[in-house]
Amino acid sequence: MERIEFGFFDAGGGHRAAATALEMSIRAQQRSWDVRLTNLQELLDELDILKKYAGIRIQDFYNAMLRNGWTLGSTQLMKVLQLAIRTYHRSTVRVLERHWKETQPDMVVSFVPHFNRALYESFDHIYPGRPFVTVLTDVADYPPHLWIEPGQRQYFVCGSERAVAQALAHGHSDDRIFRASGMILHPRFYEAPVGDRIAERERLGLRPDLPTGLVLFGGYGSKAMPKIAESLDRSPLDLQLIFICGKNEKLAGALRARKWRFPIFVEGFTNRVNYYMQLSDFFIGKPGPGSLSEALAMHLPVIVERNARTLPQERYNADWVIENEVGAVLDSFRDVEKAVAHLIEPATLARYKANAAAMKNNAVFEIPDFLATILGQARNSDVNERRLLVNRTA
């Protein structure tokens, strides 16, 4: 049984979610692999300078930054982070080498940015020739040194043509780049749709006949959510909204406490996002690769914001929305009323829904085949090397 190790961080949640979803898909396909999920933050705690001097992990600071909307200046902060990573590169490699010696994986799959140079160098030093794979959990790379490093004999799984082109531009060969049909989604997004959409809406206190928007800003919600609600509440638009506030109970309570002119439903933390998306007609949120891909898999046109506060690695996602004609991109959610009014026009909504439905993202089911191909190539290479060795010594 071949051992495969998935490396992730809990910064933002999308990396763990992708690794977990892929591991579930591998088990469902009954692959004969021993898959291990490893939180790299726990391995590298001893090198975390923020934890050492401030008592908080870098990933926890990052999550707090997202939760509170402190993303202005995130481009400069990323450069500082990358400088720290380069400064501690040798130490990081030593820690990882020690770990690989203990776990002895036949393949390492990275679901994280920033650390792919250290991951590759450490694994290749301990086990030369064993495959190292980077699965991009962003729609595209944000160079330099985010996802794709040049000069590494490794494999990539890319969820867009843009990411494939970036890998090729960095000098990686076509046979080491695998094009998935999108981002990795949890298998629940492929479950059968709800039987009676009208009845399910009514069960939540919503009307069956109104255009329904889903407002979602990650696992902790956002201060933008009540502002969006207030703007639409002042408008003459006939609609209703579903809010998913995650673990932000204060936000959920405030939304429930206020009287709105249109029907709303407020949910806290839930693993049934796919269910609420099936009851909706469009999505309002940030341009994160996970939530965008989930919405489009449920055929929901999207309304997102892109400005100086948008994380640099997510800015291309807004371009991607426009390129694929699946929604609207705003400079500010102050313009959300105009965007919603345009989007819910029957012809516009039907066109955007059709474009979203045409995407057909099956990445979570495709990638196990990619990994099997890579392992097969590694086995064949190992057999050929052994044959050459035998011939030389004969």
Image (spheres, helix red, strand yellow):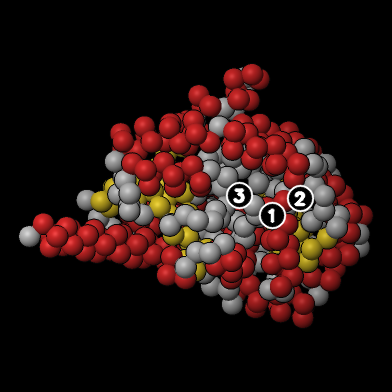
Residue closest to the eye, 106 or 347 = 106
Amino acid type, residue under disc 2 in the picture: Thr
Residue closest to the eye, 86 or 20 = 86
What is the CA distance from the residue labelled 1 to the residue labelled 3? 15 Å
Amino acid type, residue under disc 1 in the picture: Glu
Q: Foreground mark, 1 or 3?
A: 3
Q: Residue at x 24, y 64 (%)?
A: 380
Amino acid type, residue under disc 3 in the picture: His
Disc 1 or 3, which lies upstream in sequence? 3
Residue 145's tag is 3
Q: Residues within 10 Å of mark 3 (few under 14, many from 20)?
A: some
Measured from the top left, where is residue 352 in percent x and y?
A: 70, 75
Residue closest to the eye, 259 or 176 = 176
185 vs 304, left or right, is: left
Q: Quadrant of residue 321?
A: bottom right
Residue closest to the eye, 249 or 310 = 310
Q: Residue at x 51, y 46 (%)?
A: 117
Residue 314's tag is 1
Q: Are marks 3 and 2 in contact (CB under 8 Å)?
A: no
Q: Are marks 2 and 1 in contact (CB under 8 Å)?
A: yes
Disc 3 or 2, which lies upstream in sequence? 3
- In the rendered view, tell whether residue 273 sits above or below residue 207: above
Q: Residues within 10 Å of mark 2 (few under 14, many from 20)?
A: many
